[in-house]
């Protein structure tokens, strides 16, 4: 449900970054651990962007897989289907190196 | 078509507001603690017990989708309290807190407890201006919660495991629970408590006192 608030923020940022221009595309970077669901954002976007200059903008999502560093043996590994166990030593858990991203990378606007 | 580079955190507006809230709390000399849990884990019970045992002046913000039950319970302790009804939203955000604390007597309080909406997903994403995030889990919910909601448990400064008085009658593997917490959050202390019997609350109170000292 929090995707509605998230999507409102996405639209606000896009509109503020290009005042009085038609926003044609928004590129969003989402980490695997960001807790934000692409489909929900797409669904909310239609409602939130209606009657704004971002209406109809194409959404592009760049997904960032989660990478962890084992807290025991320092082995770096990719989170496999939600399994936080280190493939090297079996220790459960790691420091998150990437995968929490949640930002707008760029927007596409019509030429002046 | 023209591409404009932005690279801006989607939650930037909320994060900025949270920073302002933090400043406001610092100026008032109050430490805000964001209490998060699933519905029924015992957030309100923990706050009520803590008020009794802490021996420090506190204020409370109650967040719920609807109703004022929790604020009434806290208000009965003669503690400044304000209820936020989100009207459907599944989490509190920094702007709601800003608005709510305007009507709250913060001066003199040492801790502001913010009871978030019961939910183990969304509240983890929204900073409120707190100094600590506390996740309340409870034995009847099961030992698998840290595995199912890693976002929430990894965000926690501390975890309170409530309802340990039910351990004899519930299949709950303490080792599995703790391993799950430490997998996503190596540093957070886990306080095993029962708000019903009072067991284990001493360490939690000590932790809070240290936090504000």
Image (spheres, coloured by chain):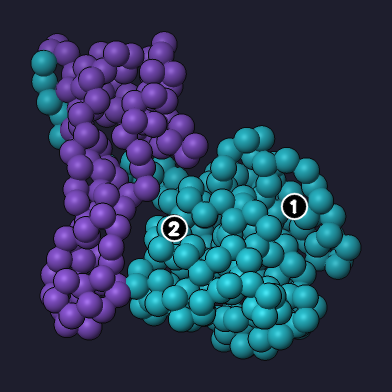
Chain colours: A purple, B cyan
Quadrant containing the C terminus of chain B is bottom right
**Which circle, 1 or 2, is nearer the viewer?**
2
Give the image quarter of residue B201. Answer: bottom right
Q: CA distance from mark 1 to mark 2?
A: 29 Å
Q: Are marks 1 and 2 in contact (CB under 8 Å)?
A: no
**CA neighbours of label 1 inside 10 A, class few (<14), some (14 to 19), many (20+):** many
Question: Residue A110: x and y, percent?
Answer: 17, 13
Quadrant containing the N terminus of chain B is top left
> In the displayed structure, does residue A55 sit left or right of residue B116?
left
Establish if B65 lies above or below A11.
Answer: below
Question: Residue A88: x and y, percent?
Answer: 14, 76
Residue receiving disc 2: B149
Label placed on residue B213? none
The number of numbered discs placed on residues in the rendered structure image is 2
> In the displayed structure, does residue B165 sit left or right of residue B133?
right
Question: Residue A15: x and y, percent?
Answer: 32, 24
Give the image quarter of residue B2. Answer: top left
Q: Nearer the viewer, residue B35 or B170?
A: B170
Q: From where the camera sits, is residue B22 visible?
A: no
Q: Secondary structure at mark 1?
A: strand
Label placed on residue B82? 1
Q: Secondary structure at mark 2?
A: loop
Who's the residue at 68% across and 75% down the image? B169
**CA neighbours of label 2 inside 10 A, class few (<14), some (14 to 19), many (20+):** some
């Amino acid at each position: 449900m929090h995707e509605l608030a998230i999507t409102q923020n996405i639209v606000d940022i896009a509109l503020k970054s290009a005042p009085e221009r038609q926003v044609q595309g928004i590129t969003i970077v989402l980490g695997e651990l960001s807790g934000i669901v692409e489909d929900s954002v797409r669904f909310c976007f239609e409602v939130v962007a209606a009657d704004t200059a971002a209406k109809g903008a194409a959404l592009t999502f760049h997904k960032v897989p989660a990478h962890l560093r084992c807290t025991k043996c320092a082995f770096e590994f990719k989170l496999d289907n939600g399994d936080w166990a280190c493939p090297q030593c079996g220790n459960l858990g790691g420091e998150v190196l990437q995968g929490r991203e949640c930002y707008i990378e760029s927007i596409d606007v019509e030429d002046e | 078509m023209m591409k404009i580079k932005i690279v801006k955190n989607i939650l930037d507006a909320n994060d900025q507001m949270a920073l302002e809230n933090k400043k406001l709390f610092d100026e008032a000399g109050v430490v805000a603690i964001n209490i998060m849990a699933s519905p029924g884990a015992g957030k309100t019970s923990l706050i009520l017990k803590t008020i009794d045992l802490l021996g420090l002046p506190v204020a409370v913000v109650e967040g719920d989708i609807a109703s004022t039950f929790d604020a009434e319970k806290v208000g009965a302790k003669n503690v400044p309290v304000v209820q936020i009804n989100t009207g459907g939203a599944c989490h509190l955000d920094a702007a709601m807190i800003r608005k709510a604390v305007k009507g709250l007597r913060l001066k003199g309080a040492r801790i502001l407890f913010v009871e978030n909406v019961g939910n183990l997903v969304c509240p983890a994403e929204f900073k409120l201006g707190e100094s600590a995030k506390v996740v309340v889990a409870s034995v009847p919910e099961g030992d698998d919660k840290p595995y199912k909601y890693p976002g929430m448990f990894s965000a926690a400064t501390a975890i309170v495991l409530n309802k340990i008085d039910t351990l004899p009658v519930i299949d709950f593997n303490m080792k599995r629970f703790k391993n799950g917490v430490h997998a996503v959050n190596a540093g957070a202390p886990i306080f095993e408590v029962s708000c019903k019997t009072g067991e284990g609350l001493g360490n939690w109170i000590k932790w809070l006192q240290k936090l504000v000292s």
